[in-house]
Amino acid sequence: MQSTLRLVDFALPPTFPPELVPKPLAQFVANCVPGLTKQQLIVRTSKCGWRPKWSAIPHLDRNGIEAYGFALTVDGVGVPLIVRMRRGQKAERPPKVPEKDPRQMSLF
C-alpha cells in the first residue's frame, strides 16, 4: 500500500527572523492543522495564488518525521518555510477541517 505525506508542523530556519514573515503567510500557517496531506497544502497555497517550491531536507529528518523546504514568495518576500511531514497509509482519511480553524494561533 502506498503512503502519503501528512503535516506535522511548520518551522523557520534559525537564520530567518519570524517578524519578517508576511501576515498572509502567518495566517495561512495558523489555519493549517496537523494531518493535512501534501496535496491539501498545495491546493490551499494555490487558492492564495502562491506556488511553493518543495525540496527534501534529509539532514533534518527525525524519528520518522521528514523535513521539506516549502519556499514561498508572499507580498514580495521570499520565505524559506520548513514543513515537517509524516508518512501515513494512503487509505487513511485526511482530516476534514475548515479553511480556518479558530483554535489555531499564529506561529509568528
Image (cartoon, grey):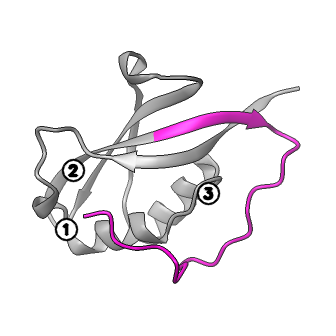
Q: Quadrant of residue 2?
A: top right
Look at mark 3 in the image and give the residue it sits on. Answer: 40
Q: Residue 22, labelled with which disc?
A: 1
The mark total stands at 3
Q: Are marks 2 and 1 in contact (CB under 8 Å)?
A: yes
Q: Is residue 104 one of those drawn in magenta?
A: yes
The N terminus lies in quadrant: top right
Q: Residue 64 got which mark?
A: none
Q: Kindly state the secondary structure of the residue where label 1 is placed.
A: loop
- Sequence-wise, the earlier of marks 2 and 3 is 3
Residue range of the region highlighted in magenta in the rendering: 84-108
Q: Amino acid at mark 1?
A: Pro
Element marked by disc 3:
helix
Was residue 47 drawn as part of the magenta stretch in this picture?
no
- Residue 77 versus residue 96: which sits nearer the camera? 96
Q: Quadrant of residue 99?
A: bottom right
- Which residue corresponds to the image point at 45% horizontal and 61% vertical from the top-left? 45
Amino acid type, residue under disc 2 in the picture:
Val
- Disc 1 crowd, CA 10 A, few/some/many (<14, 14-19, 20+): some
